């Protein structure tokens, strides 16, 4: 028998509503990776261009250089063999294959850190994030502060009437709400 173990990787998820500091926390972890001089690549989906075309940027303007990809398969294609840590922001905007991509990277021995919204503006599970949380070894769920009552906030309230699940933006379009102050939009079942 050998005592030699696999150089194991793992998956970390950072989730919660908007304004809960997910990107800040992702950037904090990635900065420590840089300090440790580990090889790092970061990705975000092409849809999110509100701040910068490629950088990962938090609401308080911290930033990390990143690569923009059109699909989760493109992450797999772009990760170098020598990369030790993979950071992914706005995970909710990726396709369902994100889970398998992260599993493959972790099996290769890499540390994978995914940040993303767990619920959309209606309070429904958002994209691949629920499955991502199930697959992850470590899940950090963050809360924001309800702008109405000041309690911890688990929901993202959309302030406009748009019915699209994805409406990229931040201040002015959305705010954080606790479960009591959150108002799900009226039922939008398609008319016959
Ligand atoms: Zn509240």
Image (spheres, rainbow, N blue to C red):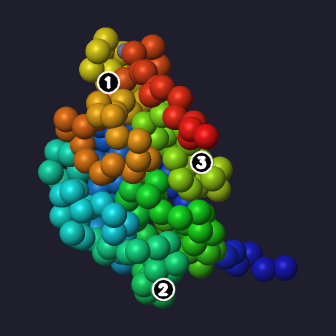
Quarter of the displayed picture in which ligand 1 can be seen? top left
Q: Compare residues 18 and 38 and report the one nearer the observer.
A: 18
Choose between 150 and 187: the one closer to the eye: 187
Q: Is residue 22 visible?
A: yes
Residue located farthest toward the left when viewing the structure as drawn: 61
Residue at 37% across, 23% down: 177
Within 10 Å of disc 3 (Cα), the crowding (few <14, some 14-19, many 20+) is: some
* Separation of marks 2 and 1 at Cα, in angstroms: 38 Å
Label 2 close to label 1 by CB (< 8 Å): no
Q: Which residue is mark 2?
A: 77
Q: Secondary structure at mark 3?
A: helix
- Mark closest to the chain's N terminus, 2 or 3: 2
- Disc sitting over residue 145 in the figure: 1
Provide residue 84's location: percent of width, then percent of height.
45, 76
Q: Residues within 10 Å of mark 2 (few under 14, many from 20)?
A: few
Residue 113 seen by the camera: no
Give residue 25's mark: none
Q: Which quarter of the figure is the N terminus placed in?
A: bottom right
Classify 31 as above or below 15: below
- Expressed as whole percent of the image width and height from the top left, the position of residue 102 reads 56, 68
- Residue behind mark 3: 130
Q: Residue at x 30, y 60 (%)?
A: 48
Mark with earlier residue (2, 1): 2
Question: How far apart, in angstroms, are the residues tagged by discs 2 and 3?
Answer: 24 Å
Foreground pick, 103 / 34: 103
Tell me which residue sits at (32%, 24%) in the image.
145
Q: Secondary structure at mark 2?
A: helix
Quadrant containing the C terminus is top right
Residue farthest along the right direction in this orientation: 1
């Amino acid at each position: 028998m050998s005592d030699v173990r696999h150089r194991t990787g793992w998956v970390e998820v950072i989730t919660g509503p908007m304004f809960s500091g997910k990107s800040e926390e992702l950037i904090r972890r990635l900065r420590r990776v840089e300090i440790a001089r580990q090889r790092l690549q970061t990705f975000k989906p092409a849809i999110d261009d509100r701040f910068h075309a490629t950088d990962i940027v938090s609401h308080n303007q911290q930033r990390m250089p990143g690569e923009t990809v059109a699909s989760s398969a493109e992450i797999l294609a772009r990760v170098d063999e020598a990369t030790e840590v993979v950071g992914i922001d706005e995970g909710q905007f990726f396709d369902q294959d994100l889970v398998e991509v992260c599993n493959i990277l972790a099996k290769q021995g890499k540390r994978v850190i995914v940040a993303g919204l767990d619920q959309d503006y209606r309070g429904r599970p958002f994209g691949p994030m629920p499955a991502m949380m199930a697959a992850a070894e470590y899940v950090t769920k963050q809360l924001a502060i309800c702008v109405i009552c000041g309690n911890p906030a688990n929901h993202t309230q959309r302030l406009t009437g748009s019915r699209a699940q994805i409406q990229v933006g931040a201040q002015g379009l959305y705010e954080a709400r606790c479960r009591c102050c959150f108002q799900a939009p009226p039922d939008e079942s398609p008319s016959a």
